[in-house]
Image (tube, rainbow, N blue to C red):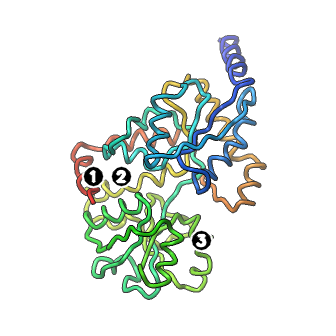
C-alpha cells in the first residue's frame, strides 16, 4: 500500500513538472477579482508538485458567466486550468440565471482568499440614519452593480425597506461623488475597499454605516446589522441567508469538475501553503489587501449545503429577485 501511494505521488509530481497552469480571471484587468487572482497566481505555483508556471488569463463577459461556463464545459479537466469565478455564481445557479450552464457544486473548490461582505452606507444628512429608518423613509441608493441592485430589490420585496434604486452611475467612485453632491443618499461597497477609499468620510463622520450583506459579521463592524437580521420570520431568514451567500464565496479559487482527486488535493495543499507564505503576506500588506482565507474542503461543503434549499424557498427566491 505504501509503495502504491508513493508511486501515485511521484506520478503527480511528474504530471505538473514542466507544464503551464492557466488561471482564468472573470473580469477585465484591474479591480478586485484581477488583483486577488494575480496575487495568488504569483505564489501558488511554488507550492505545487513540479512547480508549474502559472499564467493569468482574463476572460470577462456576461457578468462572470462566460468564465464559469468555460471552466465547466470547455476546458481541460486535469488540473492545468483553474479560475477565480464571480462570487454570485452559486446564487445565479439557484435563481436559474439565463446563460449559466455550470453547476457550482460540481466544481472542485480550492480555497478562498477573501470573503466579501458589502456595507450599505448613507450620507450623514439623509433622513435614514440607521437601517430601521429605511422602513419609514425613502433612501435613494446608487446601484452601479448587479449584486447591489439584487440585494436592495430583495429587501424591498421581502421586509419592506424603501430603497429607491438609481442605476445611472458607472461605478462606486461616481456614485460616492454623487452622494457628496446630494444627487443620491447612499451606496454600498465591500468593507475592505470602503475603509480605504472612504477613510476621510469615516474619520469625519460624514457617512453612517447601515447594513452588512454577509452572513458573518465583519470583526470591525460588530454593531452594524446584517441583511439576515432584518428577517421577520424563519422563512425570511432562510431567504435572506441565500442572498447573502455570495459573500461567503468572495474571492475564491476553483478547478473544473472531474479533475483527479489527487490533483485537487495538490491544488488545495498548494493554496493553503501559499496563502500563509511570508512572501504572499508581505505582498498583500504592501498592496493593502485584506485576507480572510477558507480551506477548499470547508468551502466545498458550504457550497454543497447551500444548494439544499426547498423547492418553495427557491421559487420564492426567484420571485422576490424580480426587479
The residue under the point 29% across, 74% down is 162
Mark 1 nearby-residue class (10 Å; few <14, some 14–19, many ≥20): many
Q: Is residue 184 left or right of residue 191?
A: left
Q: Label 3: which residue?
A: 195
Disc 1 element:
helix
* Quarter location, residue 130: bottom left
**In-front residue for pair 275/171:** 171
The residue under the point 41% across, 38% down is 304
* Quarter location, residue 97: top left
**Residues under numbered marks 2 and 1 in contact, where contact means CB atoms less than 8 Å apart:** yes
Q: Is residue 178 above or below residue 1?
A: below
Q: Label 1: which residue?
A: 317
The residue under the point 47% across, 55% down is 247
Q: Is residue 77 above or below residue 133?
A: above
Q: Position of residue 211 (x, y in %)?
A: 43, 70
Task: Count the marks.
Answer: 3
Foreground tag (2 vs 3): 3
Which callout, 1 or 3, points at the residue further toward the start of the chain?
A: 3
Q: Position of residue 297 (x, y in %)?
A: 53, 37
Amino acid at each position: 500500500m505504501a509503495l502504491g501511494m508513493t508511486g501515485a505521488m511521484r506520478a503527480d509530481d511528474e504530471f505538473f513538472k514542466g507544464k503551464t497552469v492557466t488561471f482564468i480571471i472573470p473580469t477585465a484587468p484591474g479591480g478586485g477579482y484581477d488583483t486577488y487572482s494575480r496575487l495568488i497566481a504569483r505564489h501558488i505555483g511554488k507550492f505545487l508538485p513540479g512547480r508549474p508556471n502559472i499564467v493569468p488569463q482574463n476572460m470577462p463577459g456576461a457578468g462572470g458567466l462566460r468564465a464559469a461556463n468555460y471552466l465547466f464545459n470547455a476546458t481541460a479537466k486535469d488540473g492545468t486550468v483553474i479560475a477565480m469565478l464571480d462570487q454570485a455564481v452559486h446564487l445565479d445557479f439557484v435563481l436559474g440565471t439565463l446563460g449559466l450552464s455550470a453547476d457550482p457544486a460540481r466544481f472542485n473548490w480550492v480555497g478562498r482568499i477573501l470573503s466579501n461582505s458589502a456595507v450599505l452606507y448613507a450620507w450623514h444628512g439623509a433622513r435614514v440614519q440607521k437601517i430601521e429608518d429605511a422602513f419609514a423613509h425613502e433612501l435613494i441608493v446608487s446601484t452601479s452593480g448587479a449584486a447591489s441592485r439584487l440585494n436592495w430589490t430583495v429587501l424591498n420585496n421581502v421586509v419592506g425597506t424603501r430603497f429607491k434604486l438609481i442605476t445611472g452611475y458607472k461605478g462606486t467612485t461616481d456614485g460616492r461623488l454623487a452622494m457628496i453632491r446630494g444627487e443620491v443618499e447612499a451606496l454600498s461597497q465591500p468593507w475592505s475597499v470602503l475603509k480605504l477609499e472612504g477613510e476621510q468620510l469615516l474619520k469625519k463622520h460624514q457617512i453612517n454605516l447601515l447594513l452588512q450583506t454577509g452572513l458573518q459579521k465583519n470583526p470591525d463592524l460588530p454593531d452594524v446589522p446584517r441583511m439576515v437580521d432584518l428577517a421577520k420570520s424563519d422563512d425570511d431568514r432562510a431567504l435572506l441567508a441565500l442572498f447573502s451567500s455570495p459573500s461567503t464565496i468572495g474571492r475564491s479559487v476553483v478547478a473544473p469538475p472531474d479533475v483527479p482527486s489527487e490533483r485537487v488535493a495538490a491544488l488545495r495543499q498548494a493554496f493553503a501553503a501559499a496563502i500563509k507564505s511570508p512572501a504572499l503576506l508581505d505582498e498583500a500588506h504592501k498592496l493593502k489587501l485584506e485576507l480572510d482565507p477558507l480551506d477548499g474542503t470547508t468551502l466545498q461543503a458550504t457550497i454543497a449545503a447551500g444548494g439544499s434549499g426547498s423547492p418553495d424557498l427557491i421559487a420564492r427566491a426567484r420571485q422576490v429577485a424580480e426587479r
